[in-house]
Image (spheres, helix red, strand yellow):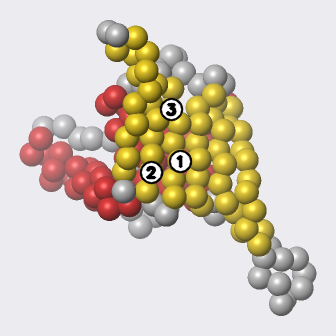
Amino acid sequence: MRIYDGSPRQDFEEVFRSIGAYLDRQGMREILLAEAPDGFIVQGLMMVSGGSRSDTMGQQIKETLTFLDDDISQFMDEAIARRGTTVSAPASVQGYYERALRVLGRYMDEQRPRDVFLFEQDGSYVLRLLMTTQAGTRHELSEFTKDDVEGLIAAAAVDRRPDAAAKTGSARR
């Protein structure tokens, strides 16, 4: 998927937010997300029910999902419909991955990478961004601890409040 080609609504913040909302609904954890030419590949751990026996708790399996451009577009449309407008839903309605991937996507939008890869473990993330510089193309790594991500989520919530938008003269997404 080439985020900056095509529709102006396609940015990492909204794309990752909508993928995160899907992952929250599926109950996926400990994710790895890689950009592909036509979408994203996501791997993570999911709980599978133990079957009809009540004494079986279930088991965790590694699941791989492929989201094509059309899937992402559908996720984004569903997210907007779920929220009712393009304004954010309250944090209490959003799941962890919807919030975390949104703020990491915003960081990526500021960097404007050509390609992204990220993995998460216990709420901490490592991002590998393919960047174009005057010296050529190279990968850059960024790390976000669980506390960093929670701080970004909290700061984003403050930035979206109407009184904060009035002070700055503009509303953020």
Tell me, for residue 83, which label it has, or none: none
- Residue 42, given in percent of the width and then of the height, sits at 64, 44
Q: Are marks 2 and 1 in contact (CB under 8 Å)?
A: yes
Q: Relative to the observer, which residue lies in front, 50 or 144?
A: 144
Report which quarter residue 34 is drawn in: top right
Picture residue at 49% right of the left edge, 63% below the top: 122
The CA span between labels 1 and 3 is 10 Å
The CA span between labels 2 and 1 is 6 Å
Picture residue at 43% right of the left edge, 15% below the top: 137
- Residue 66, given in percent of the width and then of the height, sits at 71, 39
Report which quarter residue 2 is drawn in: top right
Check disc 1 and report its element: helix, strand or loop: strand
The CA span between labels 3 and 2 is 13 Å
Check disc 2 and report its element: helix, strand or loop: strand
The residue pinned by badge 1 equals 119
The residue pinned by badge 3 equals 116
The residue pinned by badge 2 equals 125
Q: Which amino acid is tagged 2?
A: Tyr
